[in-house]
Amino acid sequence: MLDAYLKIKTNIIESLAKLEDIAASERVKIAARLISEKLNADVFSLVVVGQFKRGKTTFINALLGENLLPTAIIPLTSIITILRYGDKLRIIAFFENGTEKEIAQCDLPLYITEKFNPKNEKGVSRVEIVYPSKYLKNGVQIIDTPGIGSVFEHNTKITYEYLPQADACIFLVAVDPPLTQVELNFLRDLKNLVPRTFFVQSKIDTVSIADREESLSFSRNIIEKEADCSNIVIFPLSGKEALEGKLENDYQKVERSGLSNFERSLEKFLIDEKGEVLLKSAAEKATGLINEEMLLAELEEKSMRLPLDELENKIATFKNFIRESGQEKIDGERLLAEEVKELQEKILEEDLDTLMAIKTKELLEKVEEFAAMNSNENNARFAELIGEFLDVRIREIFSEWRPLEEKILKKHLEEIFKKFLNRMNKILEMIIHSSAELFGISYRQIQMQVAVPSEIEFRFETMDEPGILSAIIDLGIKALPKKLGHKLIIKDAREKARMLVGRHCAKAGYDFSKRMEKLVHNYRTYMTKTINSIQNDVLKALEVGTTSKQNAAFEAEILEKRLSEKINVLKGISESLQIPAL
Ligand SMILES: Nc1nc2c(ncn2[C@@H]2O[C@H](COP(=O)(O)OP(=O)(O)OP(=O)(O)O)[C@@H](O)[C@H]2O)c(=O)[nH]1
Ligand SMILES: [Mg+2]
């Protein structure tokens, strides 16, 4: 499985290793290693989600072909369980207090199930299973999540919190009952959080073919309406039968179970969409580096052949050109700073103002509703309940808003960075072009691909401080008559609601701005450093010519021979990097 993908990936990694070996420029060496490491460590998180008891864990076992994870009739999985590749089975539990512990397979249920670790009393933050499955070999991680919508609300929360890390989701719905309201709500959230979702209809072995068809078309209609799309594919399958089939080596059973059909689509997706983007960008970056190294080698070769006075003249012209391009760099950096400032002032601040106005109004209304529903409580309890209510709502407001705003800002930043990258690449192009022209060698395009916008890491990190509002009431209110007490408490709660929305907006604004500034600074520094280093590499290559002229003729001959060999090797690597269409 995924053979084509792996072959191309290995080829790129091997080409990069060869390049690293022969490159003269330290920067090219480092860049080649980084591309290779990234490609190697490439992690693609495929997260399996759905309402409780839809057969998620059974489905993962079926994909792996082994009864690895515990399943049950009662709501079971309670901890994020990450499966990744390794030579032999190893299970590591990570705890909330920062410690970790290797555990035996038979002990797995003690850590990841609601039954043996109720309300996560063991404080497990995640469990990682290293497992030698072909499926996990290409950097794909499969993640089992607790089911949503069961009586164990903390399970739903855990899954929601993990969703932003998903590269793609597999959403399991059942054949019976077909799509529920809980699932529909979940689907709405998924749309905003996960780039790609596969739909699986599980447990098809439990109903007749006619019922299966009816259920499938019911779910499809609803999902299509919700997703506003007319060609949703839902894979009907039986995880149970697929697993049995794999365990018994009965491949007809696996085929009948519907799993093979799903596996083929998943494989296609991992190659066509995930793989293609990833491999192409790595190959392009590698080709850029080869071109750079080739240019330097050709410049060296040329500089050795030119008479000294002519060479010195050309070096002086080139230095002059570098000085002139300095102003362009400064202009580009100024524009970048201005555009990011505008993003902060025009988008982020306006979004925060809107959020504050809408959410304050909404929250005040909800406080009134909540108060009316709890009018029978005594003052102390009433205050406590309202306090808790505000706590929960504030948390909800900002945890819903943050990822959405993050997406908006990221999109704008990507555009700004893209423009900056283009400007910087133009400067680089001029430098390269002028040196190639000056020395009469063929011009090769060299583009800075580093830190392209898709790699922008932009995650809002600050968490809410816990228990923002523990006491809303001062003790004196306890003794007042209920009506008056409630009135004062509501007044206090309304003020706190306003203050809290305001305070959280300000905090979010500050955090987002700081992170953006840091990103921009890193991006700009990296680009400028890269341009400077390329200029220096070119100059160094040219100066080889001046020093070689002081050497004995036979030494120069050896050097020239070595250079032309190197150019041939680089050409070979470049040719092997042509990626066939996947
Ligand atoms: N007949 C049949 N039963 C299945 C199938 N898949 C799962 N089951 C059964 O359904 C029950 C729940 O399966 P799990 O895989 O634990 O479900 P889950 O979605 O992981 O459940 P939670 O972790 O609690 O959310 C178990 O008793 C499974 O044996 C299937 O394809 N067919
Ligand atoms: Mg499960």
Image: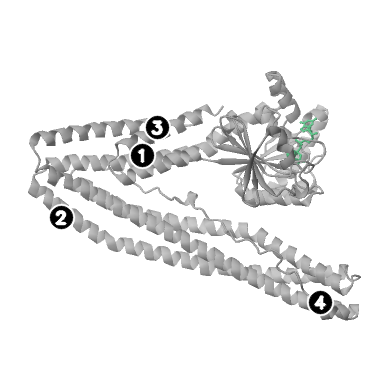
**Which residue position holds label 2?**
316
Q: Earlier in the sequence, mark 1 or mark 3?
A: 3
Binning the other alpha carbons within 10 Å of mark 2 as few (below 14), some (14 to 19) or many (20 upward) gives few
Mark 2–mark 3 CB contact (< 8 Å): no
- How many numbered discs, if any? 4
| Callout 4 amino acid | Ile
**Where does residue 199 sit, x and y in percent of width and height?**
69, 38
Q: Secondary structure at mark 3?
A: helix
Judged left or right of residue 503, residue 445 is left
Between marks 2 and 4, how big is the CA–CA gap? Answer: 79 Å
**Which residue position holds label 4?**
489
**Residue 190 seen in the current view:** yes
In front: label 1 or label 3: 3
For the point 16% across and 55% down, the residue is 317
| Callout 2 amino acid | Ala
Q: Earlier in the sequence, mark 4 or mark 3?
A: 3
**Which residue position holds label 3?**
14
Vertically, is 289 above or below 85?
below
> Which quadrant would the N terminus be assigned to in this image?
top right
**Which residue position holds label 1?**
287
Between marks 2 and 3, how big is the CA–CA gap? Answer: 39 Å
**Where does residue 476 sit, x and y in percent of width and height?**
83, 81
The quadrant holding residue 560 is: top left
Which of the pair 114/443 is nearer the observer?
A: 114
Between marks 4 and 3, how big is the CA–CA gap? Answer: 69 Å
| Callout 3 amino acid | Glu
Binning the other alpha carbons within 10 Å of mark 4 as few (below 14), some (14 to 19) or many (20 upward) gives many
